[in-house]
Amino acid sequence: MANDKEKDQLRANLAAVTPVLEQEGAVLSLNPKKTLIATDIHGNSDILDFFLKFGQEKDVDSWVFLGDYIDKGPDSIGVLNRLFELKLSNPLNVVLLRGNHETTDVNTYGEFKTSVSSEPDLFIATNTAFENMPVAVVLFGKIFCVHGGLSENESLSAISKTDSFAYLWNDPFDSKGFTPSPRGSRVKRFGPDVVKSFLKKNGLQLIIRGHITLETGVKFWFDKTLVSLYSSLPYSSPDVKAAVCIADSDAAEFFFYRKDKKKNDYVWENKPVKVLLRPSPLKESDAGNICVCGDVEFKNNGNGKSSGTENGNGSSSSNDSSSLNTNGRNGSNKKASDKKNVSFPSVSKMKSKCKKIMKGKQKSDKGKWKNKKK
């Protein structure tokens, strides 16, 4: 059970991060050098710290989390505090997608609700932040990341925060088209033809999603055009594995870990699995491969990189900012491997920085973007 100090910290983080999330669109676009993708952390703060250390060792400059941060595990509040502080330290290069546990339909009955049962205002404020989380992110103009699955509307521009049910709940299945799901009457299962059509229409190559508990860490679907990823260890058996993904513009590489009972610690295996991405220019979708982050509209310029133009207010921003350090300081020459502890900046120090970034007041060194309210 979280103590009062942790709850107060969550309140402060919510006050700072909710306006940042409000400025983000339903679909984001990110073109980093290297990103770590993880999902379904489910209240396991020790596992999250394990991922953060691994990302530092791999020199990632962005982080993408596919939802389901709370419930099941013992420390939902601790996970939220870490993730919100990471987001505040570098809002453009940390993506927090919404999962089905970030909805009141689910979390009203989960462990997180129990942990704040004496403070209903905190439960409401947390779900307000959840409601403002983006639904999906496109990486490198090639990878579509989402918690659940696809809807019958293939257009990226049709995805919205207020109508995101399919993207939080739907699952892949071997049958063609959309078929009923045992999860409930509103949930659908989608087949290989749906994935193929969606990728082709939007000029994409791969879908990475979470939502399904796996004892193997990943499951590849439809000739490796879709990957189910599960990043938490659902059981303590040494045979059970979980995984994260390290992706760049050339490949998505999946790394597996397990719990070593003798060491009483998590250990990485040395046999990652790689899915190669095509280097060829991507075909523009009916949405022009647009993805919106705050007031900024990103368009694919045909070479897999995001670009755009600036409107008359003279402001611009950058989705390829300097590399991320989890202590919130950019430009450090200290090697990630030298960092023994993962630390975060204070919320008060980052609050003003976030507002400036999300208002587009930082100058871009990667071209000019077009400001647009979504």
Image: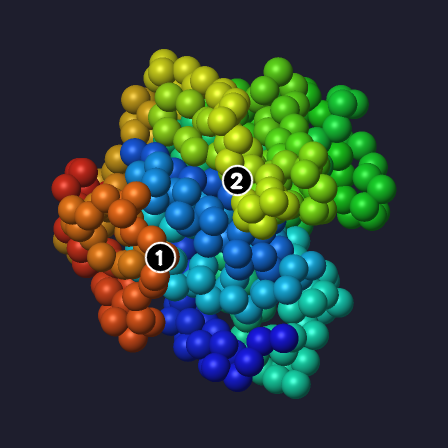
Q: Is residue 134 visible?
A: no
Considering the numbered disc 2 on the image, is that residue within a helix, a strand or a loop?
strand
Residue 129 falls left or right of residue 320: right
- Dot 2 amino acid type: Val
How is the protein colored in the picture?
rainbow
Look at mark 2 in the image and give the residue it sits on. 267
- Residue at 79% in and 23% down: 175
Which residue shows up at 56% across the image and 37% down it? 257
Q: Residue at x 80, y 32 (%)?
A: 179
Dot 1 surroundings within 10 Å: few (below 14), some, or many (20 or more)?
few
Q: Which residue is mark 1?
A: 341
Q: Is residue 180 above or below residue 44?
A: above
- Marks 1/2 in contact by CB < 8 Å: the verdict is no
Badge 1 marks a residue whose secondary structure is: loop
Q: Determine crowd level at label 2: few under 14, some 14-19, many 20+ residues with C-alpha closer than 10 A.
A: few
Find residue 259 and report its image quarter: top right
Q: Is residue 186 above or below residue 76?
A: above
User: What is the number of the mark on residue 177?
Assistant: none
- Tell me the kind of residue under disc 1: Asn
Residue 231 at least partly seen: yes
CA separation, marks 1 and 2? 17 Å
Rendering coords of residue 249 (x, y %)? 36, 26
Q: How many marks?
A: 2
Q: Is residue 29 above or below residue 282?
A: below
Q: Is residue 105 left or right of residue 342?
A: right
Q: Residue at x 70, y 74 (%)?
A: 114
